[in-house]
Image (cartoon, rainbow, N blue to C red):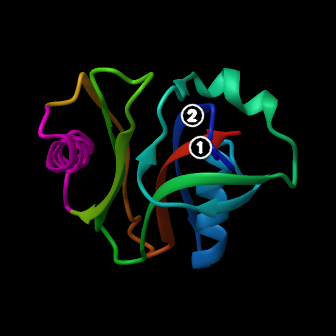
Amino acid sequence: MRQGLVPKKVFFTSGVGRHKEMLESFEMALRDAGIEKFNLVTVSSILPPNCDIIQKGEGLPTLYPGEIVFTVMSRNSSNEPSRRIAASIGCAIPKDPVKNFGYLSEHHSYGETEQCAGMYAEKLAENMLFTWTKEKPGKTMNISKTAEVDDEGNWTTVISAAVFIL
């Protein structure tokens, strides 16, 4: 069976960045999340079978500056004063994660609390898994980040990411 580039591990991270320039606020969010020194490639929403979920502190040291790293990322930006922004990744893990794949969902919104955005992302991932397997997941989880744009209207960016390790 051909397996190609199948991630063996994944960790979750999030960050917030602020700057007068939009791109630099994104860079600051990546720095806050600890993933600024990688060449990030966004991919869609499958959690591979037998993919271990590890802590960020365990995963980051295994990656090298400049490495191409696959990630499922949610991102949101605004410079509207007092605007609350959210970015979330939901995860639905199947009952048998060794044999079956799970789902990751990206959700970004305005005005939602971190908890609300996270629960929404979790439900999205759960629903995607259910429509494929007709089974409830064994476990769900999320990582979310919210921030409010400052009164000066500096660009604010929030990100949440599932970072894969091959």
Q: Find disc 2 in the rendering and name its residue.
A: 10
Element class at badge 1? strand
Give coordinates of residue 69: x percent, y percent: 71, 52
Q: Residue at x 69, y 21 (%)?
A: 58
Quadrant in the picture for the C terminus? top right
Q: Residue 122 is drawn in which quadrant?
A: top left
| Label 1 crowd (10 A; few <14 / some 14-19 / many >=20) | many
| Magenta residue check for 115 | yes
Residue contact between numbered discs 1 and 2, judged by CB atoms under 8 Å: yes
Quadrant in the picture for the N terminus? top right
- In this picture, is 122 found above or below 155? above
- In this picture, is 123 found above or below 30? above
Q: Residue at x 54, y 23 (%)?
A: 52
Distance of label 1 from label 2 (alpha carbons): 5 Å
Relative to the observer, which residue lies in front, 164 or 116?
A: 164
Q: Is residue 148 left or right of residue 5?
A: left
Q: Is residue 19 left or right of residue 98?
A: right
Span colored in magenta:
111-135
Q: Residue at x 53, y 29 (%)?
A: 51
| Label 2 crowd (10 A; few <14 / some 14-19 / many >=20) | many
Q: Find disc 1 in the rendering and name its residue.
A: 163
| Kind of residue at badge 2 | Val
Q: Residue at x 55, y 62 (%)?
A: 18
Q: Is residue 111 left or right of residue 69?
A: left
Relative to the observer, which residue lies in front, 88 or 48?
A: 48
Give coordinates of residue 94: x percent, y percent: 30, 28
Magenta residues, dominant SS class: helix
| Kind of residue at badge 1 | Val
Give coordinates of residue 33: x percent, y percent: 60, 44
